[in-house]
Amino acid sequence: MLNRQYHKRVLRAAFSLVGPGGVNPAAPADLVALVFGRHNYELDGDEAASYLDAARVARGARLPGGNASPAQPPVKDIAVTVYTPADVSRILRQGGHLS
């Protein structure tokens, strides 16, 4: 039970640091200080960084560095062509089609 309570408290503190969108700047040292002040738990920097990353991802933010998973290829931008009425008229007069 202690591990679960520990995890929930540390993650809740990480959520409060990263904010609703997960984009607030927060360093592992910030989480270490906050958790020690609130709960008297001692974290190391790597554990604090892991909790901050988990909180950011849970809130929908992307992790810095843009590391894409090998199982998922990077998402390509969708190409959108916007035609004016003059473009549509010209293309159709020339026998073309819109695609």
Image: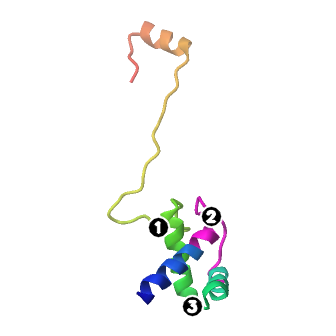
- Direction from residue 25 to residue 81 in the image, left or right: left
Count every numbered label the image shows and give the total: 3
N-terminal of the pair, mark 2 or mark 1, is: 2
- The amino acid sitting under disc 1 is Asn
Q: Do the residues labelled 2 and 1 touch (CB within 8 Å)?
A: no
Residue at x 43% of width, y 64% of height: 68
Report if residue 66 is visible in the image.
no
Residue assigned mark 2: 19
**Residue 25 falls within the magenta-colored stretch:** yes
**In front of the other: 10 or 64:** 10
Residue position for label 1? 67
Q: Where is residue 84 in the image (x, y as percent from the top left)?
A: 55, 17
Query: Which label sits in the foreground, 2 or 1?
Result: 2
Range shown magenta: 14-29
Colour convention of the picture: rainbow
Residue of label 3: 44
Assess whether mark 2 and mark 3 are in contact (beta carbons under 8 angstroms): no
Residue kind at label 2, given as amino acid type: Gly
**Residue at the outermost top position:** 93
User: Mark 1: which secondary structure?
Assistant: loop
The residue at the point 64 percent across, 88 percent down is 36
